[in-house]
Amino acid sequence: MINSSFSASTGSATSSVQAPTSPNLAIESARERVSPGEWETRVNLAACYRLMSHFGMTEMIANHISARVPGTHDRFLINPYGLLYDEVTASSLLEIDLEGNVHYNPTDLDFNKAGFVIHSAIHRALPEVECVIHSHTIAGMAVSALECGLVPISQTAMRFAKIAYHSYEGVVLNMDEQARLVEDLGEHEAMILRNHGLLTVGNTILEAFNTMFRLERACQMQIAAMSCGQKLSLPPDDVVQKTYEIFHPKLQPSFRRKPGRLEWPALLRMLDRVDPSFRE
């Protein structure tokens, strides 16, 4: 709200801007009110938000990461719309259902409508997916605007040689878009939202984050290479296919480790050294 007044001493108009009220961040711990399984999910999801912030994959309060509430088919956790990613804690996460009903909200903030449309669509259609991450990074948005999309010019990019694409339809507020989002994602672990950003899914939070980290790196590398103005070196198609099969989690032989399994404990140790408040 802007209040204007007239200054008799200067004969000029003055104005003062009243800042919006800050949200109440004195949040009571949710640990005792939820199951041990949900608390573990909350801690890991809060850690995922902090990691996205740590690695620069944020856009102020925009974007969203969700995780299914363990033991449910119709409820998921998501960030309060108004917190920076490095403010998110295990207890501050909202619990909502696939119809948009809020079942637990320890803050005076709401959830992002576009986040609900995207995440509820995927959680409803793909019960095996635990986590969905959506980002607006400079590199991700840049690649999303390229007609060629993501090009397999690096080993990391070859992991996404068969990545999904979804055409831009405007801000994702239309529930009718949900069916097209799910159809375009198909069985892929990652999707480029044209003229928009990136999206990854995972059977666990750590898988979804690992995929997003690799996808972001692939986009960064491509933009860096293309900015040099030189002709890009493309490996043979059969090499790209073999590399894709080695890295793709659904095509890996059973003896290979799941993506992110070794990285996640190390990342949590890093967060604990930097700021362990995500566990609160």
Image (spheres, helix red, strand yellow):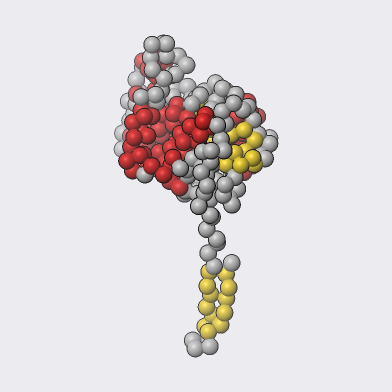
Pick out the residue farthest to the front: 32
Up-down relation of residue 81 to residue 169 (above or below)? below
Q: Which of 64 and 168 lies nearest the eye of the viewer?
A: 64
Asked where in the image residue 244 lies, by quadrant, the reply is top left
Which residue is rendered at x = 48% and y = 32% of the image? 40
Pick out the residue farthest to the bottom: 9
Which residue is rendered at x = 41% and y = 20% of the image? 258
Q: Which of 213 and 265 lies nearest the eye of the viewer?
A: 265
* x and y, in percent, of residue 263 in the image: 36, 28
Q: Which of 244 and 67 lies nearest the eye of the viewer?
A: 67
Up-down relation of residue 7 to residue 123 (above or below)? below
Q: Quadrant of the C terminus?
A: top left
* x and y, in percent, of residue 110 in the image: 60, 48
Q: How many marks?
A: 0
Up-down relation of residue 229 to residue 27 (above or below)? above
Which residue is rendered at x = 45% and y = 26% of the image? 207
In the rendered structure, the answer to whether residue 61 lies left or right of residue 172 reads left
Q: Quadrant of the N terminus?
A: bottom right
Whether residue 169 appears in this view of the structure is no
Asked where in the image residue 210 lies, by quadrant, the reply is top left
Whether residue 239 appears in this view of the structure is yes
Which residue is rendered at x = 38% and y = 17% of the image? 257
* x and y, in percent, of residue 264 in the image: 38, 29
* x and y, in percent, of residue 238 in the image: 39, 13
